[in-house]
Amino acid sequence: MKKSPLRILSTAGARDRRGLSRRQAVQRLLGGAGAGLALPGAQSAHPAHERLISNPALADAGASAADAAWQPAFFDAHQNETFLALAELIVPNSAEAQVNRFVDTLISVDTPENQKKLIASLGAFDHEAVSRYQQPFKDLSEDQQVAILTAAAAAEPGQPGQGRRRRRRPAVPATNGSEPPVLTLRDHFEDVKGWVSGAFYSSEFGMKELGWTGQVAWDSYPGCEHPDSHK
Amino acid sequence: MADQSTASYDVAIVGSGASGGWACKRLSEAGLKVALVDAGRPQSDANFTEHKPAFELKYRDQADAVIRKTRPVQKDCYACMEYNYDWFANDLDEPYTTAADKPFSWQGRLRVTGGRTNVWGRVSLRLSDLDFKAASFDGYGEDWPLSYKDVEPYYDLVEEYVGICGQAEGLPHLPDGHFQPPMPLNCAEMHFRNRVKAKLGRVPMPTRSANLTRPLNGRAACHYCGPCERGCVTHSYFNSAFTTVADALKSGNCTHIPNAMAYQVLMDADRNRARGVLYIDRVTRQPKEVKARAVVLCAQALESVRILLNSTNSQYPNGLGNSSGVLGHYLMDHIMGGGANGEFPELAGKPSMNGPNRPAGLYVARFRNLPGGPKSNFLRGYGYEGGGGTGFNWGAPGFGKSYKEALLQGQSYVGIGGFGECLARWDNYVEIDPEMKDTFGIPVLRVHMTYGENETAMVKDMAGAAAEMLEAAGAKNVHTNEHPSTPGWAIHEVGIARMGNDPKRSVLNQFQQSHDVKNLFVCDGAGFTSTACQNPTLTIMTLCVRSMDYLMGEMKRGNV
């Protein structure tokens, strides 16, 4: 059926993509990167290029995210600012890439379970901020915010599969009872980070920062070129 | 009273996908008048979005919940996404039912011309006599009523038209085809192949894929943008819509009837002959008839058998062409859920956001239960699909500048997942739901399917053998996956109108002709006598072409 790396994640890993994490969503996008408008760098006379058409109509999608009078559809004002403060520290330039706006769009149509989870994660950061410094997270100094994030990133995760190695996380949690797993600040950090990184690296700004050029056509795929061929 | 047009055709074909497209092409090009009854609406290059970056979509294809509102089952399919989900059936309009404890995920129900070939995975593998005569080899089930030498020239013909890239490996149980040059393996994959061949004698190879690496019949070679499931304006993958169906329409002998939901095969009961197809217009909901001298069902196995089961009459109270009682039974799919992945840190290249993105990867040929080899604790065998490469280290720890730097560390990996043969069982079957109708008023299917001990044992073996291969190749951090798939997940449903020589134990003969009704053929996967472990589509197309040659011969001889 499939061949690109992202498909590997489907066949060898999670068979149920309902559990697609933000990071996996970004990896999925890597297979589909390609601009509609221009063919920079497509220098050859490959016959394919004659048939490649410009994208006639861009989706209207970006428009609402870009206008100055934007209001969040899901976050309240405090949640939006908290999310933005976290995002900018976790993945710098998130504000410029309007990560908060895209995540607000996404979370507004997501399941109640995921919505609750993100709100709880933002609340957990406010709890930590008030406990340490008697202010909500977004009102702390940058040093204070970084101190909290540093502690969060180093804390033990509370449920299996969280943290660095997310690969084997089951789509459905093991049911040994009806107790939901206890989440730590590390889990909340990873949840927010997943949203932020997924949104940033799927934005045009973030993709370009990583070197995306928009090229859509190549003459060939460079296979292994080592004369001894890894015997 | 159904709208009865005065037109009458030589052949009415239901379905415009892998088999339907070929049936239309072969019959139309031979001069027969063909009606293509197509559940889909017409497809065109204008609908293809393979070059559109995700950030031009409202949700950048990350809002699964939105799609699930109308496609709760179709969204299980990897190929159903924000770009193209309107090609897929609306599951609310077109439901099906299952027994409470027997989940079945009926994915890949397409409603555009070309059917599943719009979004298929393109892996194209030949079956061999180890598959066609599997029952003689190990005693389970029934042999197919044909052998490799019967179909070999048709495999050649189909491959040469479709365009399959790949390379010869000389494996008798996975016959070599007529290939265009393969899409090359990258370093991690080449390393994996060489070590696995040398240490274990197993053969990972470039995927045999319906993607062009050379121009063919006015179609361009692949330019490696990546997402074939979103279409292809250069026609570089095989999609019936712009190949076989287009050829049929060009002949001038094929009348395309889109948005037509086939409901029943209509019978001339006195003469035990099909007289045409009753369909419901998907837009107006009007019933209409298409009259024809012969009927060929190519709607995909589940839909074709649904039509037959909905076509009862006094002579065939249990479904049309079901004097054997076998119709609807022996439903099979490929068991999945066993595999592994591992890392090759010393082979990591520099990750890139840019292509080229190769639409083919690795395939590992079956190595279990081969003639002369050891027997496993299960019957039959499995192959693996997979691939490798270098990706960004998205799982990099931390935050801020150090996170951004860390994710630039290339992660080089290889991963493989198995596709295993499912044994044919009587108690895996479909019937018409006693009560539920879809939005067109057509009674829906009720599916009863579970995997058995053979499949469970196979998944365990798939996982272990995959890890063994990765370890033999020196991979680090090898993770296995052993989680048997829900039936339906491979989207390779076959078997429910099986072929055989004995009309008491089969529905179709070796030419996919109904034993009972001589002018009725079923040319999708319904006729498979066993699943083998190879992806079925190449064989579906091949058998259809052979069967249509037979139909044309029979029509010339006045037997149909």
Image: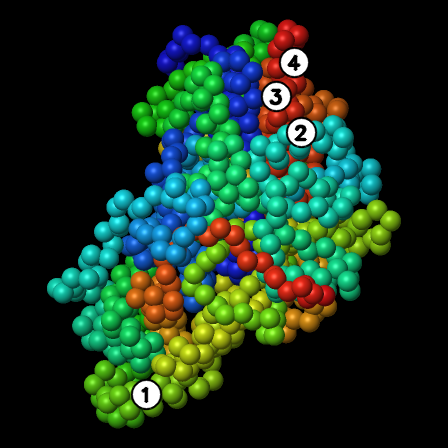
Question: How much space separates mark 4 and mark 2, taking CA atoms?
Answer: 16 Å
- Residue A212 in picture, x, y percent from top left: 38, 63
In the picture, measured across the screen, residue A98 lies left or right of residue B43, that is left
Q: Nearer the viewer, mark 1 or mark 2?
A: 2
The mark closer to the camera, 4 or 2, is 2
- Mark 4 is surrounded, within 10 Å at the Cα level, by few (under 14), some (14 to 19) or many (20 or more) other residues, namely few
Q: Nearer the viewer, residue B162 or B81?
A: B162
Does residue B317 show up? Answer: no
Chain of the residue displaying label 4: B
Disc 4 designates what residue?
Answer: B553
Q: Nearer the viewer, residue B473 or A86?
A: B473
- Disc 1 and disc 3 on one polypeptide chain: no
Q: Which residue is mark 3?
A: B548
Q: Which residue is mark 1?
A: A146
User: Mark 3 — on which chain does it sit?
Assistant: B
Between disc 4 and disc 1, the foreground one is 4
Between A11 and B99, the one lying in front of the other is: A11
Disc marking residue B149: none
Dot 4 and dot 3 residues touching (CB under 8 Å): no
Q: Is residue B391 above or below residue A56?
A: below
Residue A226, percent from left and from top:
64, 65
Within the image, what quadrant is residue B545 found in? top right
Q: Is residue A43 left or right of residue B105?
A: left
Q: Secondary structure at mark 1?
A: helix
Circle 2 sits on which residue? B154
Work out whether disc 4 and disc 3 sit on a shared chain: yes
Cα distance between the residues tagged 1 and 3: 70 Å
Badge 2: chain ID: B
Q: Amino acid at mark 1?
A: Val
Q: Are marks 1 and 3 in contact (CB under 8 Å)?
A: no
Q: Amino acid at mark 2?
A: Tyr
N-terminal label among 4 and 2: 2
